[in-house]
């Protein structure tokens, strides 16, 4: 029922073996980066608000060996594809969308004076693609650490995050916020990361084995409208700010929202962001005071707000939340990530995890005709070069 979770060591081994096969040489450099799941604080990052994600114990691992000068060849075991990039074409988006994440990071480093030599690279990953678990940020940060290992030139943590955010915006064309790349880089094992997206300060919030379990359920859908809708939500928020005469929705109090009462959609968008920021702060208190019912209720309220006011959910995610929250032992559930498909996150008593996964999965299958993917998630550590055998 639960999806298997290969160890990081086995992913590194697979990537190393694949690069040896591709290049005929032993892998010389290795790096890995986790995916992420957001506990709460959705669509608040680009509004300069707060988010509370965790890095997950599922990773993208990369291994590399010297390659033909001027060429990057990449074999992805994750999606069973191979592609190559000419280093003199760094700034033209690659024809293979997945390669743009690798290319984008190499291009960003190039413009910061870190030049990539010819390489053969292999990628192995246990982060489900298209699930809203930041498989893209994992690929970007793994590429960044790999490149630093190869060139022996290191950026600072914040420069590295910035390079990966820029890669995603410019090469993949997604006008994303900073949440994904920041948590993928900075996360610590057993901790959630409270990130203030205005000044980019972060602090860890213990989310360890004493906390309830995290069950992530993949709806199996990813809607094509997602990217256009994401940009539209950003534009709505900017328009709401203009109407209110503020720079960011972070500065807006619930009382001030009344001034948008004739603005329909803008009122809805702003209501979500303002209330979600408050929920993040309340969630941190709930975690610190080990009030799991309270945390669960905040998560479910976040889902309703995303569904009704921000309008980024979809029937499949709503169904999963409805099924999960009806189960004994579940504290709360919500969609996680950008929305329009992907995953829900369920806060559940550890001893009920398997039963809840089985029950929700069976009922979802009856409704939809396919079973969702179920993942038990632990809060893992951030991206890094892998120097020695694990
Ligand atoms: C995507 C983006 C993030 C964030 C979330 C929504 O994952 O990459 O920056 O905006 O959507 O919270």
Image (tube, rainbow, N blue to C red):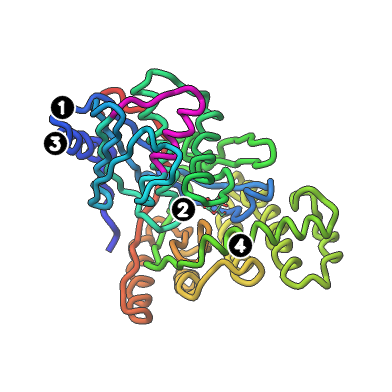
In this rendering, is residue 336 above or below 359?
above
Residue denoted by label 1:
25
Q: Position of residue 58 (x, y in %)?
A: 35, 45
In this rendering, is residue 188 above or below 250?
above
Q: Position of residue 189 (x, y in %)?
A: 44, 37
| Mark 3 residue element | helix
Badges 2 and 3: C-beta atoms under 8 Å apart?
A: no
| Mark 4 residue element | helix
Q: Residue farthest to the top?
A: 152
The quadrant in which the C terminus is found is: top left
Assign the magenta stretch its main secondary structure.
helix
Residue denoted by label 3:
21
Report how far apart the C-alphas of labels 2 and 1 lie in the structure: 45 Å
> 133 left or right of 371?
right
Report how far apart the C-alphas of labels 1 and 3 lie in the structure: 8 Å
Q: Which residues are magenta?
A: 101-118
Residue denoted by label 4:
302
Give the mark nearest the N terminus, 2 or 4: 2
Badges 3 and 4: C-beta atoms under 8 Å apart?
A: no
Give the mark nearest the N terminus, 4 or 1: 1
Q: Nearer the viewer, mark 3 or mark 4?
A: 3
Q: Position of residue 307 (x, y in %)?
A: 59, 70
């Amino acid at each position: 029922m639960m999806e298997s979770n290969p160890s990081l060591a086995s992913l590194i081994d697979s990537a190393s073996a694949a690069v040896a096969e591709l290049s005929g040489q032993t892998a010389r450099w290795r790096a890995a980066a986790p995916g992420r799941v957001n506990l709460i604080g959705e669509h608040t990052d680009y509004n300069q608000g707060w988010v509370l994600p965790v890095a997950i114990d599922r990773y993208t691992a990369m291994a590399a060996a010297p390659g033909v000068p001027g060429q990057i060849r990449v074999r992805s075991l994750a999606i069973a594809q191979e592609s190559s990039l000419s280093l003199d074409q760094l700034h033209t988006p690659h024809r293979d969308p997945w390669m743009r994440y690798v290319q984008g990071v190499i291009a960003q480093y190039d413009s910061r004076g870190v030049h990539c030599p010819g390489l053969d690279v292999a990628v192995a990953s246990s982060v489900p693609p298209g699930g809203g678990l930041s498989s893209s940020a994992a690929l970007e940060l793994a590429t960044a650490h790999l490149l630093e290992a190869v060139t022996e030139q290191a950026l600072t943590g914040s420069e590295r995050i910035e390079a990966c955010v820029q890669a995603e915006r410019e090469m993949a064309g997604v006008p994303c916020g900073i949440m994904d790349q920041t948590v993928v880089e900075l996360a610590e094992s057993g901790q959630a990361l409270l990130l203030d997206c205005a000044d980019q300060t972060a602090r860890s919030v213990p989310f360890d084995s004493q906390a309830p379990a995290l069950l992530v359920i993949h709806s199996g859908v990813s809607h094509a409208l997602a990217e256009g809708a994401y940009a539209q939500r950003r534009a709505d928020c900017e328009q709401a700010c203009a109407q209110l005469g503020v720079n960011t929705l972070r500065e807006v109090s619930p009382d001030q929202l009344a001034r948008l009462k004739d603005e329909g959609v803008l009122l809805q968008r702003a209501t979500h962001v303002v209330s979600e920021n408050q929920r993040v702060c309340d969630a941190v208190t709930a975690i610190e005071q080990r009030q799991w019912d309270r945390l669960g209720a905040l998560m479910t309220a976040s889902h309703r707000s995303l569904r009704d006011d921000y309008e980024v959910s979809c029937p499949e995610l709503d169904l999963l939340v409805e099924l999960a929250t009806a189960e004994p032992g579940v504290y709360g559930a919500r969609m996680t990530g950008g929305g329009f498909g992907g995953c829900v996150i369920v806060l559940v008593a550890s001893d009920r995890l398997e039963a809840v996964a089985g029950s929700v999965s069976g009922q979802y299958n009856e409704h939809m005709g396919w079973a969702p993917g179920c993942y038990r998630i632990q809060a893992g550590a951030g991206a890094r070069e892998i120097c020695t055998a694990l």
